[in-house]
Amino acid sequence: MKQKIVVRGPVLSQSGYGEQARFAIRALRSREDIFDIYIIPTAWGQTGWVSSDNDERAWTDQRIAQTHIFGQQGGRFDMSLQITIPNEWEKLAPVNIGYTAGIETTKVAPVWLQKANEMDKIIVVSNHSKDVFEATNYQGQNNQTGQIVHLACQTPIATVNYPVRHFEKEKLDLKLDYNFNYLAISQWGPRKNFDNLVKWFLEENFDQEVGLVLKTSVKNNSIIDREHTGSRLKSLLRSFGGENCKCKIYLVHGDLTPEEMTGLYQHPKIKALVSTAHGEGFGLPLFEAAYNGLPVIVSGWSGHCDFLYIPDPKRKGGKKKPMFASVEYDLQNVQKEAVWDNVIQADSQWAFPREASFKRRLREVRSEYSRFKRNATKLKKYLIENFTEEKKYEEFVRYTIGEEQFDATNINVSLEEIPKISLITSVFDAAEHIEQLMEDVTRQTIFKEKCEWILLNVNPKGNNREEEIILKYAEKYPNNIVYKRLPTDPGVYGVWNEAIKMSTGEFVTNINCDDRRSPNGLEIQAKYLTICPDIDLVYNDSYISRQSNTRWEDLKPGSERYHFEPFSKEAMLRGNQPHNNPMWRKNLHDKYGFFDSKYRSAGDWEFFLRCTMSGAKFKKINDILGVYYFNPRGISTNIENTEWKEKEEKEIFTKYKTIFENQ
């Protein structure tokens, strides 16, 4: 079943975040067999909106309109992907993914960490952003309790870089006076250190036949902004005495198509890209220049380091070789004018390129151009081979949907290859849940083709409500449902043992009357066991519901997640990781016996510990596939059962702790 994913971000904005949003859309569209995509467009600052008239824009407009209709009809999403700064992340769906360019400084704001911890996953565009997120922490004191509180990012983060994109160059009518020109591309603001770039260029090349092409704007690509940007540049040149220089500065302003940008990068008179930026979340213009073969002059700090270095087998310890003209820099506190409340911290730092080093690099690239061009050519080849759209789209989709679920959708396993699955259910006092339970299980994507469902009823003979409903579904699915009433109640684990002995499937899973599953949950679990013969059991996280009969599609945005640890013997001692909806190989019972029916609540934990300590291997699927009802009347959740329940658990823990310590 496809995942309904809503993408909220500046998908039509002419900005870095706009391009980031469009990359995300393209990645998701590469797997429309997995995703049903919805779009909520947002603005980004005062930047303009793309005006292109192509198939991608038409598709985007159609999905925006469809999303509006879907929302009006009360539709719900399975996932959200939110492309913006973390301050604006919120819970919109059962699974929420924050996707940000990250940060150019040495630390993120406290609110970023708070918002990050509300997400299920985070994607950033560079390892710099990931490292800063993970390294930032704050410590404070609760004014009421005096307790020391630590704030750090607890949500898993992945880095997915941008891909190389190929466009035919379109010739630009640039009237450049000289054959050697540098190119600078950025919005004019404090982070880009633009004033120094112009000043240092003028001072270094005052009497030289060299030019600097500035593709820039102050806010957007409007006509008014062009006038404002031009006036600002003239004012800057006057203040630096640039009007009397032999060197030339050219302003390029306005919308350029990808083909025109390629023509700019590949212009025969443009020889290198230069930047004096204090930091980059990724540095898309630097990346585009690099894969178009331009030498790059920039400091070796922040996001662009992901693509300006290449592996060097001659260097020890896996160190990479810089393939750009690296400018020396100092890390210093950000300027006051760059501080942005709840985004750029006043006590954070970023890189300040050294003037002398930058000027020296300008000279070296001109005087030794063939050397820098050779490195740029090698870098271009590396990027084209390793930063392909196919690879980056796969990385993005794999992390978005989850490693195991992605593998399950990509493995070459036909329905015929999946073995039979036996579902086992103990029915007792389940009138409140039985109708929806039958509906929930029979709609599983592989139920009719691959499942047998054994339901054993231990209710008093006079209670026929459950039986009536079960028999109704058994008549509809005579080849799948096996129903039997037991004369006595042997306890939940005794019922499970009886059902397993009746079962004919290769895989087994317990179906609890008050829990629910994602519609493709059984398929994902079964596929994973099919392709991993060394794994004996798979399990996953669930959502917690405080209301009975909460179906998968009825989950509210931000529903509480029941987290379980990755498998290990130590983790199994700490708690029952498989918990309420695992799937295991039936042959575990041939090897290690059945559930111990003397236990009333923890018999599954005891059995799974018995398997684990004997060498069985379990695997956590890192996605949410179930809904666990925290039933106040349930055997394991009823507070009236606490005393005997804790006694059971202590007995089991003591037994297997001793076994573990003696292994």
Image: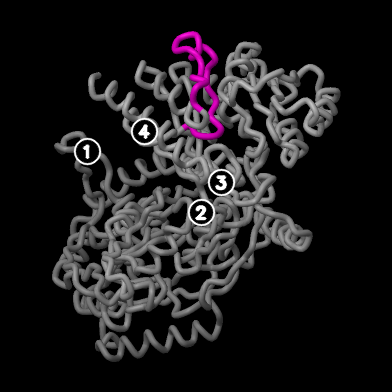
The Cα–Cα distance between marks 2 and 1, rounded to whole angstroms, is: 35 Å
Residue 76 found in image quarter: bottom right
* Residue 569 drawn at (x, y percent): 34, 28
Residues in magenta, as a range: 578-599
Q: Mark 1 highlights which residue?
A: 312
Is 594 colored magenta in this rendering? yes
Helix, strand or loop for disc 1 = loop
The residue furthest top is 590
Q: Could you tell me the amino acid type at mark 3?
A: Tyr
Which quadrant holds the N terminus? top right
Q: Are marks 4 and 2 in contact (CB under 8 Å)?
A: no
Q: Could you tell me the amino acid type at mark 1?
A: Asp
Q: Mark 4 highlights which residue?
A: 650
The answer to whether residue 502 is above or below residue 192 is above
Residue 100 seen in the figure: yes
Q: Residues within 10 Å of mark 1 (few under 14, many from 20)?
A: few
Q: Earlier in the sequence, mark 4 or mark 2?
A: 2
